Amino acid sequence: MDRQELFEEVVETIKAIDSTVKPKEFRLDDTAFRAYGIDSLTLIRLAARLEDRYDIRISDADAFAASSFQRLVDLLLGKLMAAQGDPR
């Protein structure tokens, strides 16, 4: 899975969690989630759904540290590679 595909899946997941967000504005960059109106409760719910979907562990601290789409996608890619045994 590449960065763009993962970003699109994260966006779809956020839309399912919070219908008040405006996904047309979302960009795969370092813009903070709060700038898009994504709050901490949504981030925790997002992390839980991503854990289930990809069979990975995302701590609350990791979820809060991944404060943008870019950081979250990077975190997910790292965890997915580690789960597949890729040492990168």
Image (cartoon, grey):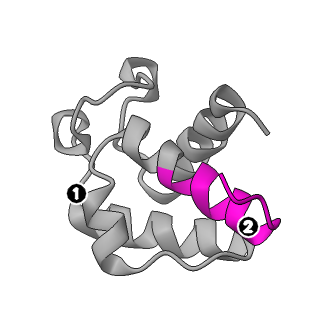
Foreground mark, 2 or 1?
2
For this view, does 34 lie left or right of residue 16? left
Q: Mark 1 highlights which residue?
A: 39
Label 2 to label 1: alpha-carbon separation: 22 Å
For this view, does 2 lie left or right of residue 84? left
Extreme-front residue of the structure: 87
Place of residue 81 in the rendered image (x, y in percent of width and height, measured from the top left): 72, 57
Q: Mark 2 highlights which residue?
A: 54
Residue at 66% over, 40% down: 6
Marks 2 & 1, CB-CB < 8 Å contact: no
Element type at mark 2: helix
Mark 2 residue type? Tyr
Mark 1 residue type? Asp
Place of residue 28 in the rendered image (x, y in percent of width and height, measured from the top left): 45, 25
Query: Does 50 lie within the magenta span?
Result: no
**Viewer-closest of 19 and 74:** 74
Residue 22 position (above or below residue 63)? above
**Viewer-closest of 47 and 15:** 47
Place of residue 59 in the rendered image (x, y in percent of width and height, measured from the top left): 41, 80
Q: Residues within 10 Å of mark 1 (few under 14, many from 20)?
A: few
Look at the image and tell me in which quarter the N terminus lies.
top right
**Mark found first going from the N terminus, 2 or 1:** 1
| Residue 76 falls in image quadrant | bottom right
The residue range painted magenta reads 75-88
Residue 24 position (above or below residue 33)? above
Query: Does 78 lie within the magenta span?
Result: yes
